Image: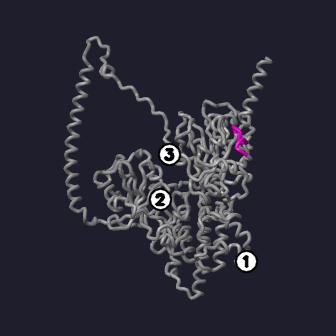
């Protein structure tokens, strides 16, 4: 009995040591609670760890994972959003699903076994001695850090036995002094195995991760003897030979039928090709028009890319093959159908996707200018692996139509690539007109243009939040996703991350992985992964701050030393200025943040009102943020006041003609 008690005590002590292993590393301190940055985590893997497992453990996407091609044992580098939101400590969140094999174990040793020293349980669950259940989701903190400005990134690394500051310096191409400075080490001998240290980096570590699940063993082929086994029968009738002969005869009939069909198809295809060659150098005669109504796409249940149930009379639809499961398509595209273009049409319209036609790079593909059937278009080019994002954009844009949303015209597909065709925005993105516009070939936007753009974008967001049959959260509102037409009217684009949400009073939310762009992510979205309409409101508030200041959402600020810069969120900078600007008559601090390209040609009271509206939009408490309907009303009033200000100065406003018309 005594021996059993001693063994039990030793086991409990060992578990406590393991569970407290990560707790020996304190998180990095921070002071700016609005600070966000990109960070990396070095995670040691073995051959049995798949990419899907890494994505699940760290709540990231595949593109957030890179690999170290030279280290042994292998490491992967995981990109995570790092923030200063938890008691002024730099941390990021993830979740762990408890595997069946570890049912009944306390959560702490399971976490330690999975992550080593990189993760720890929050205080609320750290002391829990209850056994974990299979499938239970455990919330965790991960160690991360934001650089003070000397480097672009910090990477969390758990020091192993045999590691030294010198070996890490050589391995990651940074100086020993940099590692010591980033971690506050007095010397290279102060590093201790089992603790987390931060490796300063100026570029993204590693190479694309090629790990994958072990291929399943192929199913054994049935032997001929198995197929043609003769049943036990007293008369010894040759059933196997009869069945085999019938199968061969059927196969020959099928081959003959396919040959006839192929012959007819090739004849018709050659005739079409001949006609196409004749007309190749002439403009295609039939055009399309962008319709701002549900009649644009027509009706139908299935996506037109040869998923089954396609009609051969649908013209070009039969020439496209992409691997999207039929069941998913039926669910996603029970709606209007967009125009189907051929792969050749898309290539011809963009000069074979020449660099001179490149408009920019979106979240999941590159966007090119094209002239398709005599109309200017923008074509997003994606690899066939981006089926999920392709489906998301089609699913939303075939259902929603509004003047302040970029209209989807159609799509095309090949074996390797997917293409989405949109209406063309002649003036490009809002980002290019705000941030260093002159060097990008653009003129600076006037104050009234900025307010009109804000109002247009607000109306587009209000529409998808409130007025569609299904309500959506965009999840990636930013100035590069707000496009401007020839009249500088704004349209929201890039719905690849859009999320359907259920309407449930004030609590309209959908749990998801954190995606989006740093500087625009709401604190509760970073913390809990809940995508809500109020998350979009937060991002829109940052856009309003950009319209006022001309600065980017994450901007560099000068430190005490001229060569020392620090990356800070624009929201934190503008909120600090507003704290020292009580009203429009005493806003010296705010004036220092106003875009100098405006050259003081703006109504001070209207700028102050937009700044205060932006402040409400980025409130830490999502309940206190206005909804987009309230934002639209406020911006409409501010626009009217701005026009009156311009008229009082005998300005030549270009806004009056369409000011009071509904969009």
State the SS at label 1: loop
For the question of whether residue 198 can be seen, the reply is: yes
Q: Are marks 2 and 1 in contact (CB under 8 Å)?
A: no
Which badge, 2 or 1, is on the more N-terminal residue? 2
Residue 614: where, in percent of width, then height?
64, 67
In the rendered view, tell whether residue 649 sits above or below residue 597: below
Q: Does residue 191 belong to the magenta stretch?
A: yes
Tell which of 371 and 293 is nearer to you.
Answer: 371
In the rendered view, tell whether residue 462 sits above or below residue 11: below
Which quadrant, please, contains the N terminus?
top right
Name the dominant secondary structure of the magenta segment: loop
Callout 3: few (<14), some (14-19), or many (20+) C-alpha neighbours within 10 Å?
A: some
State the SS at label 2: strand
Front disc: 2 or 1: 2
As drawn, the label of residue 208 is: 3
Residue 459: where, in percent of width, then height?
54, 68
Which badge, 1 or 3, is on the more N-terminal residue? 3
Q: Does residue 501 belong to the magenta stretch?
A: no
Residue at mark 1: 586
Residue at mark 2: 361
As drawn, the label of residue 319 is: none
**Magenta highlight range:** 187-194
Q: Is residue 542 left or right of residue 226?
A: right
Residue 130: where, in percent of width, then height?
72, 34
Which badge, 2 or 3, is on the more N-terminal residue? 3
In the rendered view, tell whether residue 103 sits above or below residue 29: above
Residue furthest right as drawn: 2
Q: Is residue 68 left or right of residue 591?
A: left
Q: Are marks 1 and 3 in contact (CB under 8 Å)?
A: no
Cα separation between marks 2 and 3: 19 Å
């Amino acid at each position: 009995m005594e021996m059993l008690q001693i063994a039990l005590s030793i086991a409990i002590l060992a578990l406590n040591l393991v569970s407290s292993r990560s707790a020996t590393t304190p998180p990095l301190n921070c002071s700016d609670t609005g600070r966000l940055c990109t960070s990396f985590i070095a995670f040691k893997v073995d051959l049995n760890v798949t990419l899907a497992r890494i994505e699940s453990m760290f709540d990231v996407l595949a593109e957030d994972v890179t690999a170290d091609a030279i280290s042994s044992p292998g490491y992967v580098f995981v990109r995570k959003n790092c923030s200063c939101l938890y008691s002024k400590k730099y941390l990021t969140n993830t979740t762990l699903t408890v595997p069946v094999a570890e049912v009944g174990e306390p959560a702490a040793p399971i976490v330690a076994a999975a992550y080593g020293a990189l993760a720890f349980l929050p205080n609320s669950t750290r002391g829990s001695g209850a056994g974990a259940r299979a499938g239970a989701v455990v919330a965790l903190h991960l160690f991360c850090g934001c650089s003070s400005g000397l480097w672009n990134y910090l990477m969390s690394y758990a020091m192993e036995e045999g590691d030294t500051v010198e070996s890490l310096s050589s391995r990651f191409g940074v100086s020993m002094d940099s590692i010591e400075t980033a971690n506050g080490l007095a010397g290279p001998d102060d590093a201790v195995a089992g603790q987390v240290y931060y490796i300063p980096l100026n570029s993204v570590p590693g190479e694309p991760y090629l790990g994958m699940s072990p291929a399943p063993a192929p199913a054994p082929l049935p032997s001929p003897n198995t197929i043609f086994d003769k049943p036990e029968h007293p008369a010894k009738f040759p059933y196997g030979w009869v069945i085999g002969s019938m199968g061969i005869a059927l196969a020959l009939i099928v081959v003959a039928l396919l040959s006839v069909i192929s012959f007819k198809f090739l004849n018709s295809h050659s005739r079409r090709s001949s006609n196409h060659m004749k007309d190749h150098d002439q403009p295609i005669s039939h055009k399309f028009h962008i319709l701002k109504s549900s009649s644009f796409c027509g009706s139908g249940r299935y996506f037109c890319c040869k998923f089954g149930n396609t009609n051969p009379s649908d013209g070009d639809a039969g020439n496209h093959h992409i691997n999207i499961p039929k069941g998913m398509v039926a669910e996603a595209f029970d709606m209007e159908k967009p125009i189907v273009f051929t792969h050749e049409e898309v290539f011809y319209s963009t000069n074979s996707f020449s660099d001179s036609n490149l408009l920019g790079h979106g979240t999941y593909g590159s966007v090119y200018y094209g002239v398709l059937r005599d109309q200017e278009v923008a074509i997003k080019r994606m690899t066939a692996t981006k089926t999920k994002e392709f489906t998301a954009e089609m699913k939303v844009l075939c259902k929603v139509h509004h003047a302040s949303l970029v209209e989807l015209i159609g799509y095309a597909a090949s074996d390797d690539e997917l293409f989405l065709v949109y209406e063309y925005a002649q003036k490009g993105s809002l980002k290019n007109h705000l941030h260093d516009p002159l060097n990008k070939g653009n003129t600076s936007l006037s104050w009234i243009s900025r307010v009109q753009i804000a109002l247009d974008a607000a109306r587009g967001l209000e529409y998808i939040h409130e007025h569609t049959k299904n309500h959506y959260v965009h999840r990636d509102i930013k100035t590069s996703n707000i496009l401007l037409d020839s009249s500088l009217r704004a349209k929201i684009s890039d719905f690849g991350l859009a999320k359907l949400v259920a309407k449930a009073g004030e609590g309209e939310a959908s749990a998801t992985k954190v995606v989006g762009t740093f500087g625009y992510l709401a604190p509760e979205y970073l913390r809990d992964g809940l995508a809500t309409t109020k998350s979009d409101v937060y991002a829109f508030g940052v856009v309003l701050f950009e319209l006022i200041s001309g600065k980017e959402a994450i901007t560099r600020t000068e430190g005490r030393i001229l060569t020392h810069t620090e990356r800070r969120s624009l929201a934190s900078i503008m909120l600090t200025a507003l704290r020292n600007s009580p009203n429009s008559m005493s806003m010296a601090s705010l004036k220092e943040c106003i875009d100098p390209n405006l050259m003081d040609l703006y109504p001070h009271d209207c700028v102050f009102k937009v700044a205060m509206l932006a402040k409400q939009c980025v409130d830490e408490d999502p309940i206190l943020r206005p909804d987009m309907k309230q934002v639209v009303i406020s911006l409409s009033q501010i626009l009217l006041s701005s026009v009156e200000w311009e008229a009082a100065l005998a300005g030549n406003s270009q806004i009056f003609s369409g000011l009071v018309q509904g969009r």
